[in-house]
């Protein structure tokens, strides 16, 4: 089976040699399509030529083509999943955004491609400046599958640490199009050819330009090279098409190459050598090393270079012939034959090592955090989590969920046979951390992320703090505080309907936007997240809520009460519910009992609210012995409350409404909810939707009516069947 390579370099000339060579060596290739303009201006390019050769799903290629490897944003989990599922190796240029992404997300062999730097600069020093020492420690961690892939075998001489230890010589070759002018030099123009690009863009380029003009002012010269910013000099050509460039190589009398960088060389002197033009260059540069000691074109200083150029301009055929003959040894180091032999010698063992490295277990842990204040719905959350777990086992049996429950709030063992499901269970609580503390935590994990908030919240279990997890899933989106990006995380978002009652907090919106993915149960919520908060549709997974495997279609014997639900978070809604109940009993003194269930954690403030409500009810003869208020029920008590009621009314926004609808359907109870939740999703086919505002009559009228709920077993089972595919798709993308 062919190996697949990610080639994250996007260099025009390099791609024309290296990609065909990789194909010759029997690998499939993917190259990025989203490339910053800065790279494109610096000889960058984009090619689709290799997409059709990839034996991976077209949708995976489409997702990769829409992803930018070179920006500062974190790699989404779906891209990470594609890379690790389908690719074996990654070649990456020394673009630190790209390198950081690949090193922190790709589990295959990584080769950072080094083309050499100027003077005494080293890749180690630049890496420390940009990414810090911790990034180099991270490379040490993965050094069994990391290589410093140098294009010239002396680059690592100036390196240290991991780059020197893991250096690998994979030479750089010249594309076949360069050889279209092989030995076509005639030198019929008495011109000295010199290259200097971006004169007005870089201080160093402008310095080289001025020095050349001063040193070679007695010669008739042409200065070629791309000039994004025009230069006011008639001898500077600016950008030239390939044919125009080739004509210069064929017609100019001689080229001078200035660089004395010992570990880097430009393409243009090599192109001139191919044409057969004599190239005069300075000692100390890479051409000196490649050509060995005896090179007629090599000069100790500018003065010697000027003497040799004068001789060539005067028609010294002996010198010209000797220079051109000596240049052949340099060109051989860039030939297809030399490159292929070296790549077979040095790269083939890497290819063979891929299978061994991939055999190493890549078992992943995913931490799930059960929210606080949902005691009456804890069974629904557990059911949801267990279903996620069962489909996770289908996709990746080696992966495992870690279920984190709020410390001292739930005894999860009551409803979850941990051993049966191969789950880890931990307890957690949120801790507020300053930006500096989060930064230190990231450093210990060899990560560097931009931190914009002054403080963050982090889930802690006082053991490993779930750092061992691949990513985190919070089963609650209304978290107070900005989640620290210690790990990539996802949020379970039932809905954002509470935006109609109060503005969504800044922290909550930040958590949505920084999340790697969001899970919801309805297309309506996905639409709301996309339309109102600008969340990308690609990172929202819709998983329709699954019903229990055994449907209870029998009517339970009902007590004579109607259940009304509200959130303790909205006292004004509770006041209107009470006013409506009073209006109802004024006309129906012998009407059914009404039980009010208040959702939310029983904080000190909420406990006071409940106490005041009960005191108010006991004072009114009209309500006493007819109205009861319930709060902080256990899930079994809440199920009993649902099971025995005649009807459920939810006039305003409540948290976990989708679970409440699910319970109503399961127990075959009529349910009336606010029309704000009306949508086409299957789960919402069963409630009756009414427009509730703060008009008392709206709720009073519902208390007079009793409706029936038509539940179809076949329809519910159809929902469950589509659900399985949705969950499998999610895990495949995330893992």
Image (spheres, rainbow, N blue to C red):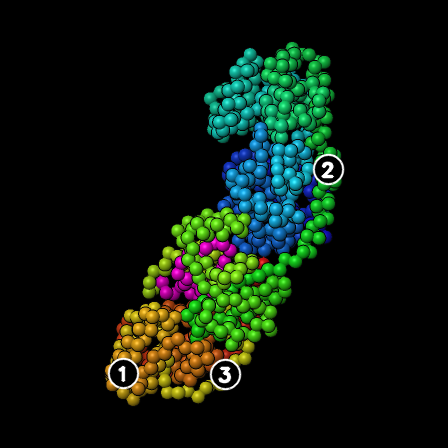
Which numbered disc flags the more N-terminal residue, 3 or 2? 2
Residue at the image position 58 percent from the left and 32 percent from the top: 117
Q: Is residue 16 visible?
A: no
Q: How many neighbours does mark 3 have within 10 angstroms: few (below 14), some (14-19), or many (20 or more)?
A: some
Gap between marks 1 and 3 measured at Cα? 37 Å
Q: Residue at x 45, y 52 (%)?
A: 437
Q: Magenta residues, as a range?
A: 475-499
Relative to 14, is 495 above or below?
Answer: below
Above or below: residue 527 compared with residue 607: above
Query: Which is closer to the viewer, label 3 or label 2?
Result: 2
Q: Mark 1 points at which residue?
A: 618
The residue tagged 3 is: 553
Q: Is residue 365 magenta?
A: no
Q: Which SS class for mark 1? A: helix
The front one of 564 and 13 is 564
**Label 2 neighbourhood size at 10 Å, few (<14), some (14-19), many (20+)?**
some
Q: Which residue lies furthest to the front in this view?
A: 462
Which residue in the protein does label 2 denote?
342
**Residue 691 sits in which quadrant?**
bottom left
Q: Quadrant of residue 42?
A: top right
Task: Please name whichever residue, 141 or 649, is drawn nearer the observer in this view of the structure.
Answer: 141
- Mark 2 or mark 1: whose residue is earlier in sequence: 2
Q: Is 478 one of the magenta-colored residues?
A: yes
Is any part of residue 193 visible from this angle?
yes
**What percent of the width, then of the height, locates residue 540?**
49, 59
The relative height of residue 478 versus residue 297 in the rendered view (above or below) is below
Dot 1 or dot 3, earlier in sequence: 3
Q: How many labels does the image show?
A: 3
């Amino acid at each position: 089976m062919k190996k697949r390579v990610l080639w994250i370099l996007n260099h025009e000339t390099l791609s024309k040699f290296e990609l065909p060579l990789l194909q010759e060596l029997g690998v499939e290739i993917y190259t990025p399509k989203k490339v910053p303009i800065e790279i494109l201006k610096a000889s960058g390019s984009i090619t689709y030529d290799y997409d059709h050769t990839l034996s991976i799903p077209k949708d995976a290629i489409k997702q990769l083509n829409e992803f930018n490897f070179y920006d500062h944003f974190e790699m989404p989990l779906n891209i990470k999943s594609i890379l690790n599922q389908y690719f074996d190796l990654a070649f990456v240029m020394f673009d630190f955004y790209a390198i950081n992404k690949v090193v922190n997300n790709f589990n295959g062999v990584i080769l950072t491609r080094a083309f050499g730097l100027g003077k005494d600069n080293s890749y180690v020093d630049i890496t420390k400046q940009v990414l810090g020492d911790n990034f180099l420690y991270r490379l040490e961690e993965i050094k069994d599958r990391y290589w410093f892939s140098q294009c010239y075998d002396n680059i690592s001489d100036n390196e240290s640490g991991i780059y020197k230890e893991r250096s690998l010589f994979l030479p750089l070759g010249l594309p076949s199009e360069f050889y279209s002018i092989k030995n076509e030099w005639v030198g019929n123009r008495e011109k000295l050819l010199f290259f200097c690009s971006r004169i007005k863009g870089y201080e160093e380029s402008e310095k080289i330009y001025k020095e050349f003009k001063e040193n070679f002012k007695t010669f008739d010269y042409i200065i070629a090279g791309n000039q994004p910013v025009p230069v006011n000099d008639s001898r500077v050509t600016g950008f030239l098409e390939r044919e125009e460039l080739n004509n210069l190589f064929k017609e100019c009398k001689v080229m001078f190459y200035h660089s004395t960088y010992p570990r880097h060389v430009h393409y243009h002197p090599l192109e001139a050598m191919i044409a057969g033009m004599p190239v005069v260059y300075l000692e100390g540069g890479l051409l000196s090393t490649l050509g060995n000691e005896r090179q007629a074109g090599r000069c100790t200083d500018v003065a010697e270079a000027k003497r040799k150029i004068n001789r060539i301009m005067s028609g010294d055929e002996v010198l010209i012939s000797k220079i051109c003959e000596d240049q052949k040894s340099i060109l051989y180091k860039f030939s297809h034959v030399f490159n292929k032999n070296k790549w077979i010698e040095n790269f083939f063992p890497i290819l063979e090592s891929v299978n061994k490295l991939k055999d190493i277990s890549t078992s992943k842990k995913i931490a799930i955090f059960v929210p606080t204040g949902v005691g009456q719905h804890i069974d629904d959350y557990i059911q949801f989590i267990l279903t996620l777990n069962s489909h996770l086992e289908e996709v990746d049996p080696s992966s495992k969920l870690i279920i984190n429950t709020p410390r001292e709030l739930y005894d999860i063992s009551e409803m979850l046979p941990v051993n049966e499901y191969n789950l880890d269970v931990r307890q957690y609580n949120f801790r507020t951390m300053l930006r500096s503390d989060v930064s230190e935590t990231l450093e210990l994990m060899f990560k560097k992320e931009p931190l914009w908030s002054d403080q963050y919240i982090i889930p802690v279990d006082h053991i490993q703090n779930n750092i061992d997890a691949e990513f985190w899933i919070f089963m609650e989106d209304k978290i107070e505080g900005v989640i620290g990006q210690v790990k990539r995380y996802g949020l379970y978002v039932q809905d954002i309907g509470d935006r109609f009652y109060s503005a969504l907090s800044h922290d909550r919106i930040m958590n949505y936007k920084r999340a790697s993915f969001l899970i919801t149960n309805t297309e309506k919520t996905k639409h709301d997240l996309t339309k109102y908060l600008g969340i990308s549709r690609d990172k929202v997974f819709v998983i329709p809520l699954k019903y229990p495997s055994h449907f209870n279609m029998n009517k339970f014997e009902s007590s004579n009460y109607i259940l009304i639900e509200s959130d303790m978070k909205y006292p004004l809604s509770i006041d209107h519910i009470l006013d409506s109940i009073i209006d109802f009993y004024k006309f129906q003194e012998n009407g059914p009992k009404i039980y009010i269930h208040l959702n939310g954690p029983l904080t000190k403030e909420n406990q006071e609210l409940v106490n005041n409500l009960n005191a108010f009810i006991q004072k009114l003869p009209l309500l006493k012995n007819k109205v009861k208020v319930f709060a902080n029920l256990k899930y079994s008590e809440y199920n009993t409350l649902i099971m025995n009621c005649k009807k459920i009314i939810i006039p305003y926004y409540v948290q976990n409404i989708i679970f409440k609808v699910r319970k109503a359907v399961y127990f075959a109870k009529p349910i009336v909810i606010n029309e704000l939740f009306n949508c086409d999703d299957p789960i919402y086919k069963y409630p009756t939707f009414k427009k509730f505002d703060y008009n008392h009559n709206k709720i009073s009228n519902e208390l007079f009516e009793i409706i029936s709920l038509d539940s179809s077993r076949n329809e519910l089972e159809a929902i469950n069947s589509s659900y399985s595919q949705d969950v499998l798709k999610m895990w495949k993308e995330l893992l």
